[in-house]
């Protein structure tokens, strides 16, 4: 027995457009294409479509579904992919829970005619780099730094941001003065920059992990140099590059000395 696109779409509860898209990306091939250009699907294609729809309902991306279905006939790859996807969904749920708590707090305070706490209002909304931190350093590292940040009062957060801005502003001043990355002034500020890193829980520098700290700082130096966002934060591209190179020199010296 064979079904056309429209017939299969109706029976599967999906759309003909979706089936044509699955064909275009190589996710679901028809058994044959007739001389009239119609696609015809047999029992094997129907069975594959059923698995596609089941996995799609979990929220798994189509590219991941394709890898799962093509990787193994035993179902082991599918189990591994579903386990990884479940972990990803759990992380998304945690982030959503934080946002919901922030909204609930704001709503409750408004109903009482009170001003909500700013740190609670922002909980879950200002964690722009969560995915990146979790990927590089793990969930515990993000949770530690997140709890540390949201444990501060609004005034403490403002003071910390002010200190961070001053740190970056000093790089701009050094660049405007024509200082070289290896100069004493630049290396003194690189040391101050390193001390600033140690203040942030969840980072290797805070944990005292020397090897991973070096890797973290070198990775950040690359981002300082390449990312337009950091160029803006430092004030100029030149200041960001000066900071990047000075930090590389600083960690190289630390590595050589064993300190």
Image (spheres, rainbow, N blue to C red):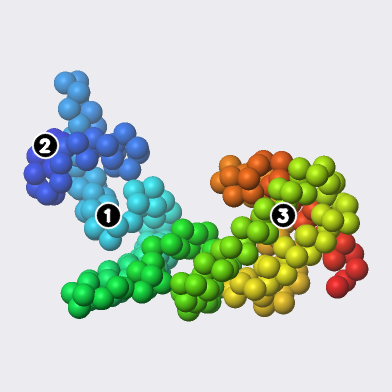
In the figure, is residue 16 to the left or right of 226? left
How far is disc 3 from disc 2 in space, using C-alphas?
66 Å
Residue 189 in sight from this viewpoint? yes
Q: Residue at x 27, y 71 (%)?
A: 106
How far is disc 1 from disc 2 in space, using C-alphas?
20 Å
User: Pointer 1: what residue?
Assistant: 56
Secondary structure of the residue carrying numbered label 2: helix
Q: Are marks 1 and 3 in contact (CB under 8 Å)?
A: no
Secondary structure of the residue carrying numbered label 1: helix
Marks counted in the figure total 3
Say which mark, if any, is on residue 6.
2
Q: Are marks 3 and 2 in contact (CB under 8 Å)?
A: no
| Quarter placement of the C terminus | bottom right
Query: Which comes before the other along the chain, label 3 or label 2?
Result: 2
Q: Residue at x 33, y 56 (%)?
A: 60
Determine whether 123 is above or below 14 in the image: below
Determine whether 116 is above or below 235 in the image: below
Residue 165 on image: x %, y %:
61, 58
Q: Quadrant of residue 42?
A: top left
Residue 49 on image: x %, y %:
23, 49
Q: Are marks 1 and 2 in contact (CB under 8 Å)?
A: no
User: Pointer 3: what residue?
Assistant: 170
How far is disc 1 from disc 3 in space, using C-alphas?
51 Å
């Amino acid at each position: 027995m064979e079904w056309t696109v429209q017939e299969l779409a109706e029976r599967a509860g999906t759309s003909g457009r979706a089936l044509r898209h699955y064909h275009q990306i190589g996710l679901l091939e028809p058994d044959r294409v007739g001389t009239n250009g119609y696609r015809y699907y047999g029992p094997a294609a129907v069975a594959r479509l059923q698995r596609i729809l089941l996995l799609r309902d979990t929220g798994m991306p189509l590219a991941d579904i394709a890898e799962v279905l093509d990787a193994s006939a035993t179902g082991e790859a599918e189990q591994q992919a579903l386990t990884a996807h479940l972990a990803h969904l759990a992380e998304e749920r945690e982030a959503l829970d934080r946002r919901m708590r922030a909204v609930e707090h704001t709503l409750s305070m408004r109903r009482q005619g009170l001003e909500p706490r700013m740190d609670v209002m922002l909980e879950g909304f200002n964690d722009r780099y969560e995915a990146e931190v979790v990927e590089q350093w793990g969930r515990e590292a993000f949770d530690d730094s997140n709890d540390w940040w949201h444990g501060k009062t609004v005034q403490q957060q403002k003071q910390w941001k002010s200190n961070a801005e001053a740190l970056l502003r000093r790089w701009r001043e050094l660049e405007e003065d024509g200082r070289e990355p290896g100069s004493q002034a630049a290396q003194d500020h690189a040391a101050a920059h390193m001390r600033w890193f140690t203040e942030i829980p969840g980072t290797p520098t805070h944990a005292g992990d020397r090897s991973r700290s070096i890797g973290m700082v070198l990775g950040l130096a690359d981002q300082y140099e390449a990312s337009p966002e950091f160029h803006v934060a430092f004030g100029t591209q030149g200041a960001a590059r000066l900071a990047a190179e000075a930090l590389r020199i600083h960690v190289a010296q630390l590595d050589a000395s064993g300190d």
